[in-house]
Amino acid sequence: MYSFDECRLCPRSCAANRIDKKGFCGAPSQLKAARAALHFGEEPCISGTKGSGTVFFSGCNLRCCFCQNYEVSHSIFGKEISAAELSKIFLRLQKEGAHNINLVSGTPYVPLIIDALNQAGEKLHIPIVYNSSGYESLETLTMLDGYIDIYLPDFKYFSSELSAKYSAAADYADIALPAIKEMLRQTGSPIFNNEGILQKGTVIRHLVLPNHSGDSISVLQLLADELPRGEFLLSLMSQYTPDFLHGDFPELSRKLTSYEYNKVVKEALRLGLDRGYMQDRSSIGTAYTPHFGLEGIE
């Protein structure tokens, strides 16, 4: 059993004794979650028609200043539950018709999530999605090998200056690239069922930020140069909204323009990164942000 008295689950390796105090992520040593319900705001191959059985965990090891789940990632809103309770939540969501179990920001709790998955055992037969910031240690990903069917990581930044400024992680790109390569190794090429629902594979998300389309293009170039073509899906997102911005960042205080987003889309197509999803501009706003009211947390 993993000991939380010197936590090194994420790349920050802060060695916090989470039994007595919290590290950078703000997570306790006990599982803590803010919502567990069917969610329809993911990519079509994840949410489908029945929804993704999504568990939003409290705390985050990246904590971006513009996070749309700020209440959970920064304020650590949620309720503590046991691994046995989480296992029952997985099975309930499956019974409700979820296409998959979607673990959002589960990094601080990986050993406990594995415990819950082991308790569910063969009774849980839908795909398991690991929904991540992309800022993951290879050691923790190795722990997840064999448990995760679908990885859903972000690749947020190319520039170390931007990642330091907005996420206090100057090493973001250096960490995210090998992490995503490990995710691809584990899942292999995307596999869909007859309904078009992803059963296995990796979907890489990138959120285009206002005034930073150049960094987005650098991210796409890196993915095209470093990752095997056709082995992943790209989800290019335009949903940034300043409604969630915390801190003094005037360059992020407006919505993304169509010109900025379309420039990035054009580059993705030029690079041949056309397998995946280009988000519609109507997605801008708060529509993709769920209400965190402990729904489904027993």
Image: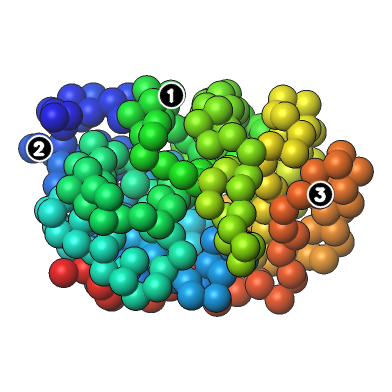
What label does residue 57 carry, if any?
none
Task: Say what secondary structure mark 3 lies in.
Answer: loop
Compared across the picture, whether 230 is left or right of 163 comes to right
Percent x, y of residue 83: 16, 50
Residue in view at x 72 percent, y 58 percent = 277
Percent x, y of residue 153: 53, 44
The tag earlier along the polypeptide, 2 or 3, is 2
Label 1, label 3: how far apart the Cα atoms are: 28 Å
What label does residue 138 carry, if any?
1
Inspect this view and state whether residue 188 appears.
yes
The one nearer the camera, 20 or 133, is 133
Disc 1 + disc 3, Cβ < 8 Å? no
Dot 2: within a 10 Å radius of its alpha carbon, few (fewer than 14), some, or many (20 or more) residues?
A: some
Dot 1: within a 10 Å radius of its alpha carbon, few (fewer than 14), some, or many (20 or more) residues?
A: many
Q: Give the labeled residue for mark 3.
A: 274
Task: Say what secondary structure mark 1 lies in.
Answer: helix
Dot 3: within a 10 Å radius of its alpha carbon, few (fewer than 14), some, or many (20 or more) residues?
A: some
Quarter holding the C terminus is bottom left
The one nearer the camera, 179 or 194, is 194
The one nearer the camera, 73 or 131, is 131
Label 2, label 3: how far apart the Cα atoms are: 46 Å
Compared across the picture, whether 151 is left or right of 270 comes to left
Residue in view at x 26 percent, y 41 percent = 114
Q: Give the labeled residue for mark 2.
A: 19
The tag earlier along the polypeptide, 2 or 1, is 2
